[in-house]
Amino acid sequence: MSDTTGIKPPSLWRNRAFTLLWSSQALSDLGSSMSQLAMPLLTLAVTGSPIQAGIVGTSAAVVRLACQLPAGVVTDRIDRKRLMLVADAVRLSAYTLLGVLVLSDRVSLAWILAINMIATVFHVAHENSQFGAVRNVVPLDRVPEATARNEARQAAVSLVGPPIGGALFGLARALPFFTDALSYLLSFIGVSLIRQPMQQERSEPREHPIKELAEGVKFTLSEPFLRAILLIAPPINLAFNGIIFAMIVILQQQGTPPALIGTVETIVGGGLLVGALLAPMLSRRVPMRTLVIGITWLGTALLAGAALLTGSVLVGIPVALAIMLGPACNAALFGYQAAVTPDRLQGRVMSVIFLLATSLASLSALLGGTLVHLVGGPATVLVFAAFMGLSAVAATTSQGVRRMKPLSELQPVS
């Protein structure tokens, strides 16, 4: 949304409820990201088996996909603040238990699997609740900016969390899990301090969970803009995840030293962080329709250009520039989604979007590796650029995107 008044809006950091919500989710995400590295390291230390370490990671991914839709129903049924507090309390207990088991040398693969899957279930519930809460703690026309700030938070946490988890694991195996538990305790305190309601009053009678789930799916498919998200977001996720994996495989096949490959990944991660930091400014100054359409086409061009550089570590530069555009695009898409979706359906709509986006992205590594083997590096990069192009075509031709209005002209849907 462009700033046409010339008056700079007050900073969201002066909004106590948003600041507490943002900080609590940052702590919660930090705990989760530390575990992303510490958990497979623990599995390897306990079992000595890379296969079993892979089983732990795959099980969490499967659980995440399986509980997305049910989590949407639950977060629309239960008070969001209460659910976030429960999610933090459960994960606090789970990681404290895991730390104790590691300290006492009684940890096993079964314990690791169980705790990892439980934590994943409640991570999804916490994340879904937070998304739905945003539009209730900030003015409607500031939701894209709030979403952009959340993108910055996620980018920063994804960069610093795994190294912290690995460093703590190197000091003591139990330390990252006790630190995770502490992060959830601090998140619990932050959420409990929020006084502003995180949802509108619920007056409609409860239906059977299956019927409520069907209602969320039906609404998502019936609303033009939400249909557009279902066409735009999944190919973007597949393109970015696939091209990053393919880039690593291509460089490894060319004999690039691991340190240089790590540098390329750092460049890409840095691009994401810079983009996330720029996203709040872009969301305030550029119309959302322009952001969505322009970013998808520019991203397609940058990824296609990366095909010319697959023989060099410079391939990371256009990929980083393309990924840098992602947070602003997400802010526009999900900010507008919050405006056109009734509060009582927020959880279910987001669960449908997340399920499609993440399920398609889960194929990215397999597709990327297969394509590199069959058609080579440049062609693989062009295939993923074509997926990005599908999102650009969908954004350009979609009536839901073309009819986007400034949020100041919309009334919140109740």
Image: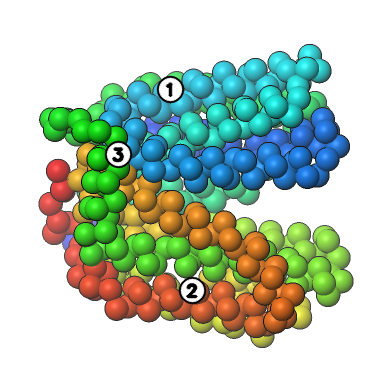
Mark 3 surroundings: few (<14), some (14-19) or many (≥20) residues within 10 A: few
Label 2 to label 1: alpha-carbon separation:
38 Å
Q: Is residue 106 left or right of residue 67?
A: right
Q: Nearer the viewer, mark 1 or mark 3?
A: 3
Where disc 2 sits, the SS reads helix
Q: Earlier in the sequence, mark 1 or mark 3?
A: 1
Q: Please determine whether, in this image, residue 284 is positioned above or below residue 343.
A: below
Question: What type is the residue that disc 1 sits on?
Answer: Val
Label 1 to label 3: alpha-carbon separation:
23 Å
**Image disc number at residue 391:** none
Figure quadrant of residue 160? top right
**In front of the other: 295 or 345:** 345
Mark 2 surroundings: few (<14), some (14-19) or many (≥20) residues within 10 A: many
Instruction: State the residue position of label 1.
Output: 86
What's the residue at 48%, 43% (across, down)?
A: 66
Q: How is the image coloured?
A: rainbow
Question: What type is the residue that disc 3 sits on?
Answer: Ile
